[in-house]
Amino acid sequence: MKIGFYPGCSLTGSSREYNESVVAIAKVLDIELTEINDWNCCGATAAHSMNEELSMSLPARIMAMAEKQGLTEVVVPCAACYNRLKVTQHDLKDETKRKRVSEILQLPYDGSIEIINVLQMLEKYGAENIKAKVTQPFAHKVACYYGCLLVRPHSILQFDRVEDPQSMDELIKVVGGTTIDWAFKTECCGGGFSVSRTDLVAKLSGNILEDAADRGAEALIVACPMCQSNLDMRRGAINKVIERPSDIPVIYITQAIGLALGIDAKELGLKRHFVTVEL
Amino acid sequence: MSSEEIFEPKIVAFVCNWCTYAGADLTGTSRLKYATNVKIVRFPCTGRIDFLLLLKSFAQGADGIIVSGCHPNDCHYTSGNFHARRRWIAFRSILDMMGVDVRRVQYSWVSAAEGSKWADLVNNTVADIRALGPYTDYQKVADYLEKEVQDGEA
Amino acid sequence: MSKIGVFICHCGENISATVDVERVAREIGGMEGVAHAIDYKYMCSDPGQTFIKEAVKKYDLDGVVVGACSPRMHEPTFRRACAEAGLNPYLCEMANLREHCSWVHEKGEETTEKAIDLVKMLVEKVKKNNPLESIKVPVTKRALVIGGGIAGIQASLDIANTGHKVILIERDPSIGGHMSQLSETFPTLDCSQCILTPRMVEVAQHPNIKLYTYAELESLEGFIGNFTAKIRLKAKSVNYSTCTGCGACIQKCPVKKIPSEFNAGLGTRTAIYVPFPQAVPNKPVIDRVNCNYYKRGACKICEKTCQVGSIEWDKEDEIISEEVGAVVLATGFDVKGTDFFPEYGYGKYKDVLTGLQFERLASASGPTFGEIRRPSDGAIPKKIVFIACAGSRDPAKGIPYCSKICCMYTAKHAMLYQHKVHDGESTVFYMDIRAGGKNYEEFVRRAIEEDTVNYVRGRVARVYEKNGKLIVKGVDTLLGGEQVEIEADMVVLATAGVANCGSEQLAQKLHVSYDPYHFFAEAHPKLKPVETNTAGIFLAGACQAPKDIPETVGMASGAAVKVAALFSNNELVREPIIAVVNRLAPPLYSTCVGCFMCETACPYNAIEHEEIKARDGSLIRTIARVNSGLCQGCGTCVAFCRSKSIDIQGYTNEQVYAEVMSLLND
Amino acid sequence: MEHKGKITDLQSHTGVEVMRCYQCGKCTAGCVLATDMNFPPSYVMRLLQTGTKENYIKILGSNSIWLCLNCENCLGRCPMEIDIPKMMDYLRTQAIKENILHPDSKPIISFHRSFLDSIKYTGRLYELGLIAEFKARTFRVTQDLTIAPAMFLKGKLHLLPEKIKDRMTMKRIFAKTIENVKTENK
Ligand SMILES: Cc1cc2nc3c(=O)[nH]c(=O)nc-3n(C[C@H](O)[C@H](O)[C@H](O)COP(=O)(O)OP(=O)(O)OC[C@H]3O[C@@H](n4cnc5c(N)ncnc54)[C@H](O)[C@@H]3O)c2cc1C
Ligand SMILES: Cc1cc2nc3c(=O)[nH]c(=O)nc-3n(C[C@H](O)[C@H](O)[C@H](O)COP(=O)(O)OP(=O)(O)OC[C@H]3O[C@@H](n4cnc5c(N)ncnc54)[C@H](O)[C@@H]3O)c2cc1C
Ligand code: SF4
Ligand code: SF4
Ligand code: SF4
Ligand code: SF4
Ligand code: SF4
Ligand code: SF4
Ligand code: SF4
Ligand code: SF4
């Protein structure tokens, strides 16, 4: 199975382990990932907080490049990038906006590419394969954390339920894990405020970690580098806010699946986390 | 057409007494506003609407026509609207044959409770017909009708 | 040349505010064939009608056009006036200058011009009108009432007490509807069962009422005064003529875990069951879907238990036919569940209930015998949160309208809770308190002031469960948007009142209109609230829109009076809007060629074959003839007839052609 | 009636019909940062509904528009489907344009600017550069003193920026959008 791949900036930098684990399990599942040539940053929160046209042009260029390459389906592991690409695709259905953006890009764009997230890729191309290839069941009780960007806005993304989504939970169950029913599945972790308002991120991420820990989760499972870094790297600030040390690890869904498929922890980048992962 | 003199199309609406006429009454009772171009002719049922009459209207210079009655299954007379719909399918090809753009006939359903739908229907139709421009080929239809009548009598 | 009188109405200012009525009258006055044209402030008023009558006589008019409101409003009024002045009423037409013109357009030149066009159109039509004679049809003085809630019960009793026969059909095994499920009723807090049960019994015993429970309407044919209803009597599997209602079978039935509909899913029932203790009739039915015998072919314990041998295994549904003259629709409403509200727990938290479930908890006949206990663990909730408008006034997830009854029942619930759990705390999250009604506001104030119910103005964003508590995250908008978090033991959602499932199909069977929410549509929002657009079919209760008991009962009595009024005549006058096949002098007889396309088109089988015979009895030809008793005047045949031999009175080809041409000619 | 025009602009731009909000407060009830905001989201809606200039300026000058995380909790639950996050995006650009900025906006804007600068020249995010630039802009020299080296050690920070080839397009995108004053806020 061949499919386009947009890693985005985090996956080449601060979230290398997400990239590593995506690539590693894709290999095991016979999914061939073709990276988009000369891709650029999607602009993330910064672009759409500051200028709408910029926020559409950046993702549009990425998709135009993919189209040029003949890709028809592109997987975008970063939830923030996924969201930006999907929303841009939706916004550019508007004729005037599309015209304006083509003018800026000077590249043809027809908006035909199917943009999917990692969960969709696994559901679509891996679900049965994964089950067959599990060698070390991921026998842990975990909390699946979806954050905001994977499920909202529902009207555009049309992915899973807005409140209490289930797709990640299903995948964890496939690899032998159990998931808890908890309250903060889709509450915001503080998103793009990681650097600018670490205090707020610590407060929001703290609530999330506490609820998961209170309900007996051994780990948080995520599918977004922004969530991961807020929940993992900001643990110092978080612990100060919640006034107790929290050592619950935060791992990517691809890492959890990778472990179950028998892939080495190092290859999955599990050593790169701030909070030690002992699963 | 220059922007100052907007083309005001002449549109006739053939509607049934039970659903759309009542729906248009509700538009009024609710004080919703719409364009003045459309004038309603009341029929007992859309099943009554003879499509020859539609042709005659075009021959007489109508720019557009609305046919509207009860929703499928909701016909006051059980099935009149189904007959109307079936005839409409045949009628489309006749329109085509005569070079009348089928978009000039707006076929719709508006129930007695859908006052705002009626206002929307009128406004959209007026906008659509305005975009299509005035209907000018009426002589062609008139000729056809004359022939049809002769054939019918023969 | 025709002599037509034209009367343009101002309707106070309703028409004259946007239409230059004087100009309309002036211009129409100049039309060919118009003998007299005036405008007047209120045409339907006494002096207005007198103007018409006098003009008919003075100018010897042979046609009248009234440019006023919708003909659906006042056509009968003006036709009557004409008739009183000696003019055939069908020579009078109305141009709809109000609903179709003055109310939907701004003041201006075009609006006046449109008004002129509309009047002209009708003037041209009237020139082609023919005098018609109304048709008289007999009336079957027996009413069909569909739905046995309080609306159907009240309507049946009221009609039956005027001396007419009533057939009442109820879908469930017992009559009573939602009212039988209620604990106590606002605004008086009297026990619902106590006031309802006597009426239910009265229905069962009334000599003029024939009650069919476990029955549904199969089809309805015919027209006002002359309907034929086919009714499906669902197989009960119990012979009611021998069953004594002893209940022994119910005690012994081994299938006991079926969620009870009557208890809104909070209790259970058996496969052979009586829905509730006060049911009427108080005899069981077997729920075949859940019965072991029907499912697997074995059990029959009930049969062994029954002393009188009343169980009937092989009974099939039966379809009976009843002739009736009028129908009252009283099928009530439904209550949405909790499961469409994801943020309030997807229906997955057992202690998030609907208002109806709370009624069952609070009811002495309910699963907890009136004690408020949590379904999850049976504990008495110490903190309870009520969420108003949960689904109503919510275009995103529910319905845009206000369900009208929930503000009141929420206040009632909170009050009942406070009366039953003295140390309990109740909070109501609301947006507005809608308590318009006699003693309603006083009732809500009592809840707040005397029973210390905490009313917080704001919506709840979400409810989640933690450590056995339901965490409710709301807001107090009156404190500038301060977030409020409550750890509750129970949450009650005032879910929306919606149309009954199947109401759309029922409406289609009856040919009555329904609104976008599938509630049945009344004929006029103010002046004909119990009539439908279909003559002879009336509405009562919550099938028209959510409403409380007093309003339901008032409406039911209203519908009953309408039925009684209809039955006070031996004959009905029907409009002669029917089809006729033309007849010509011999040797032509008719232009009808006997193709009988009209016959295939007619939905009412009104086309008959007429044989035209010579004097010697030999057949000359067969042509179509319309049975005026059956024809409903839809006109479908007219559109099908290629030779234009059949036409419909009141909407003849000539008439509609004249209308259309007048519109397009200038 | 200059301010009414502003509301009309907002509506035509974002598709949000301000008058549809019926002040139920559900957005506020679920907003994770409502308590940190000068005005919680439903209050912002109400201020907009008044249509007065004072209130419009109040909103632009508040921290509410800057603290909104665009998490869309409010939109997902609003019974009237009012797109508050989209409105917040718009209000932010207006606040910058009119230069009415709450102090809380400073680090956030600085971060966004640093972020965008970083991608403008290279096409991709250069995280080390971003942190450095952000520190320079905000004078928060000591922030994240421990995190950056740790990230580096875990292989999470590149020392050198990655650059895309087609930097011309990137330049053009910036020139024609955010740097083009005329189209700003478009
Ligand atoms: C939680 C709650 C609390 C309430 N509390 C109060 C209160 O305290 N005071 C008050 O005044 N009002 C109260 N109400 C409102 C009250 O329930 C209604 O006003 C009343 O039930 C309406 O009566 P109805 O006969 O129109 O409809 P229903 O009670 O719904 O009865 C309709 C009947 O028709 C039957 N039916 C449906 N479809 C068919 C069919 N196709 N064929 C045959 N039969 C059919 C049904 O089985 C049912 O028996 C409350 C409502 C709710 C939901
Ligand atoms: C400002 C206002 C606006 C309204 N707007 C609306 C609206 O938009 N829509 C709506 O649906 N409703 C509206 N209403 C309500 C509406 O007016 C009433 O519902 C309606 O008038 C009630 O009709 P009625 O016949 O019961 O009483 P009334 O209209 O009060 O008629 C009672 C009649 O009885 C006569 N009468 C009184 N005592 C005696 C006596 N002892 N002997 C003989 N005759 C007597 C009176 O002279 C009067 O003619 C409005 C009411 C008001 C005050
Ligand atoms: S006739 Fe109709 S339009 Fe005229 S006053 Fe009466 S209600 Fe109004
Ligand atoms: S046969 Fe059916 S109804 Fe009778 S006792 Fe058995 S399960 Fe119950
Ligand atoms: S069916 Fe028999 S046992 Fe059951 S209630 Fe009737 S008489 Fe009693
Ligand atoms: S009656 Fe009250 S609770 Fe019910 S929908 Fe209306 S306002 Fe909301
Ligand atoms: S009336 Fe017309 S359609 Fe009917 S049989 Fe005669 S010719 Fe045929
Ligand atoms: S008008 Fe014609 S089609 Fe309609 S009921 Fe009468 S005879 Fe039948
Ligand atoms: S949730 Fe929506 S309607 Fe309610 S206050 Fe917020 S924006 Fe307004
Ligand atoms: S999008 Fe903004 S306003 Fe809405 S809930 Fe999230 S932070 Fe609050």
Image (tube, coloured by chain):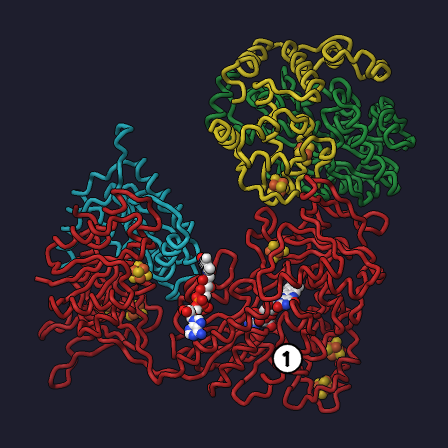
Chain colours: A green, B cyan, C red, D yellow
Q: Is residue C16 left or right of residue C87?
A: right
Q: Which residue is mark 1?
A: C236
Image quadrant where residue A51 sits: top right
Q: Residue at x 12, y 82 (%)?
A: C614
Using the image, determine if residue C36 lies above or below residue A274.
Answer: below
Taking the spot 35% from the left edge, 85% from the top edge, the residue there is C570
Q: Position of residue C101 (x, y in %)?
A: 31, 51
Residue at the image point whose x is 37% and y is 53% from the top:
B28
- Mark 1 residue's CB less than 8 Å from ligand 5: no
* Nearer-the-camera pick, C259 or B50: C259
Give coordinates of residue C189: x percent, y percent.
Answer: 69, 70
Of residues C490 and D128, which is closer to you in this image? C490
Could you tell me if residue C136 is visible in this image?
yes
Residue C353 x %, y %: 73, 58
Residue at horizontal 47 percent and vertical 74 percent from the top: C559
Q: Which amino acid type corresponds to the residue marked 1 in the rendered image?
A: Lys
- Can you say whether D121 is above or below D76 in the image? above
* Residue A2 in sight in this render: no
Side of D114 where C368 appears, left or right? right
Residue A274 location in percent, x, y?
87, 23
Ligand 2 - quadrant of the structure image: bottom left
Of the 4 image quadrants, the one containing the C terminus of chain A is: top right
Q: Nearer the viewer, residue C116 or A40?
A: C116
Q: Chain of mark 1?
A: C
**Pointer 1: residues within 10 angstroms few (<14), some, or many (20+)?**
many
Count of picture labels: 1
The N terminus of chain A sits in image quarter: top right
